[in-house]
Every structure is written in C-alpha cells, then in structure tokens.
Image: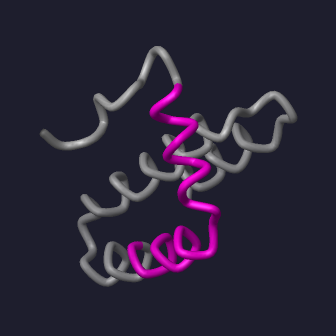
Amino acid sequence: LEPICLGINMNQTDARHPDQALLTFAGTFLYFQKHVKPSVANGMAKWIEKRWKALDQPMFVLALVLNPYEGISHFGD
C-alpha cells in the first residue's frame, strides 16, 4: 500500500511532469511485480495495465523521450 500512497502524493502537485508521472506508474508496476504473494502481484498487474490502457500513452512516452535526463535509456536495444 505504501508505494501506491507515495505515488499518489507525488503526482498530486501541479508541477508534476508527464514523464515523471509515467516513471512513478512504472515504478509501482515493477514494485508489485516482485510481490511475494502471486495473487497480489497478478491483481495489481491487471489493475495497472487497465489504467495504462486508459491513459494517453503516446503523450507520456513522448514526454519521457524528450526529457534530457531520461531520453530513450528506458527502452530496449
């Protein structure tokens, strides 16, 4: 529950950029992917994927690519 609360608090500010929101979203996904209870890991993965599908994905990915500190380093080879 802590990573969800932390992500919500970080993303509530008006100064939050879309690339930062995407990294928070991805960090939450990765955190729950490693959860010790498979039922929690699978349930959260489905919940996060459902929310990701509802977002304007190209805008978030473009914001991440255009960020000079992140760029395309988070994408595969």
Relative height, residue 9 to residue 48 (above, below): above
| Left or right: where 16 falls relative to 74 | right
In front here: 76 or 48? 76
For image coordinates 37% across by 77% down, the residue present is 40
Q: Residue at x 36, y 61 (%)?
A: 32
Relative placement, left or right, of 10 versus 52 is right
State whether the magenta stretch is mostly helix, strand or loop: helix
Q: Is residue 3 left or right of residue 34?
A: right
Image position, residue 72 (x, y; %): 33, 31
Answer left or right for 39 relative to 58.
left
Q: Nearer the viewer, residue 24 or 75?
A: 75
The quadrant the C terminus occupies is: top left
**Residue drawn 81% across the image and 43% down it:** 12
Q: Quadrant of residue 57?
A: bottom right
Q: In front: 41, or 29?
A: 29
Q: Which residues are magenta?
A: 45-66
